[in-house]
C-alpha cells in the first residue's frame, strides 16, 4: 500500500495524494452550507445531523467522482480511485466538516480568519504538491 503519492502515477492509488487537501476544503464548505441552510430555516443547531450530512455528501462525491466523472472521461488519469484512496478521501472530507463544526461555534472574526486560512492554505498546499508531483518523472 502506498501511503503518500510521490509521483503522478500514484495519484488516486495511494492513500494520500494532492487531491486530499481539496477534500478537506470541500468537507468544510459543505458543512458550512448545510449549517447555514438549517440554521436559517429552523434557527436551531443540528451538530450531529450536520456531521451525518457531511458523511452522506462525502460518499455521494466519491460515487460521482469514480463513476460519473470516470464515465465522461473527466476523472484524473481516467482511472478510478483505489479503495484506500476513496476511504481516505472520505476521512479528509469528514475532517474538514469537523473543523467547520468547531469554527461555527466561535466568534465571527475567528470564523472569517479561519475560513480564509483553510480555503487559501489548503488550496495552496494542493497546488504546490500537484506542481511538484506532476513535474516528477517516475
Image: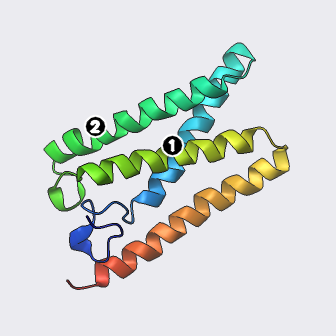
Apparent side of residue 8 relative to residue 121 in the rendered image (left or right): left
Q: Compared to 95, does 34 lie above or below? A: above
Apparent side of residue 90 relative to residue 72 in the rendered image (left or right): right
Crowding at dot 1, Cα within 10 Å, few <14 / some 14-19 / many 20+, comes out as many
Mark 2 against mark 1, which lies toward the viewer? 1
Q: Compared to 57, does 38 lie above or below? A: above
Residue at image coords 73%, 39%: 104
User: What percent of the width, then of the height, locates residue 71?
Assistant: 14, 43
Residue at image coords 46%, 67%: 126
Question: Is residue 28 visible from the viewing direction of this image?
Answer: no
Looking at the rendered structure, the number of numbered marks drawn on it comes to 2
Residue 98 vs residue 128, the one in the foreground? 98
Q: Secondary structure at mark 2?
A: helix
Residue at image coords 78%, 38%: 105
The quarter holding residue 132 reads bottom left
User: What percent of the width, then of the height, locates residue 60?
Assistant: 35, 33
Q: Secondary structure at mark 1?
A: helix
* Residue on which the image places disc 1: 94
Question: Is residue 36 visible from the viewing direction of this image?
Answer: yes
Residue 64 vs residue 48, the one in the foreground? 48
User: What percent of the width, then of the height, locates residue 66?
Assistant: 23, 44
Residue at image coords 34%, 60%: 15
Crowding at dot 2, Cα within 10 Å, few <14 / some 14-19 / many 20+, comes out as some
* Residue on which the image places disc 2: 63
Instruction: Give the CA separation, mark 2 to mark 1.
Output: 16 Å
Q: Compared to 126, does 7 lie above or below? A: below
Apparent side of residue 55 relative to residue 62 in the rendered image (left or right): right
The quarter holding residue 120 reads bottom right
User: What percent of the width, then of the height, locates residue 5?
Assistant: 32, 71
Q: Which quarter of the figure is the N terminus placed in? A: bottom left
Amino acid at each position: 500500500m502506498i501511503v503518500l503519492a510521490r509521483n503522478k502515477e500514484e495519484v488516486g492509488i495511494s492513500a494520500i495524494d494532492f487531491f486530499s487537501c481539496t477534500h478537506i476544503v470541500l468537507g468544510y464548505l459543505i458543512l458550512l452550507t448545510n449549517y447555514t441552510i438549517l440554521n436559517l430555516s429552523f434557527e436551531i443547531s443540528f451538530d450531529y445531523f450536520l456531521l451525518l450530512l457531511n458523511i452522506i455528501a462525502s460518499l455521494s462525491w466519491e460515487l460521482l467522482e469514480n463513476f460519473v466523472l470516470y464515465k465522461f472521461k473527466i476523472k484524473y488519469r481516467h482511472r478510478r480511485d483505489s479503495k484506500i484512496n476513496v476511504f481516505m478521501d472520505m476521512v479528509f472530507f469528514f475532517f474538514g466538516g469537523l473543523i467547520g463544526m468547531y469554527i461555527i461555534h466561535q466568534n465571527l472574526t475567528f470564523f472569517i480568519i479561519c475560513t480564509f486560512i483553510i480555503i487559501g492554505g489548503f488550496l495552496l498546499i494542493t497546488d504546490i504538491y500537484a506542481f511538484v508531483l506532476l513535474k516528477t518523472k517516475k
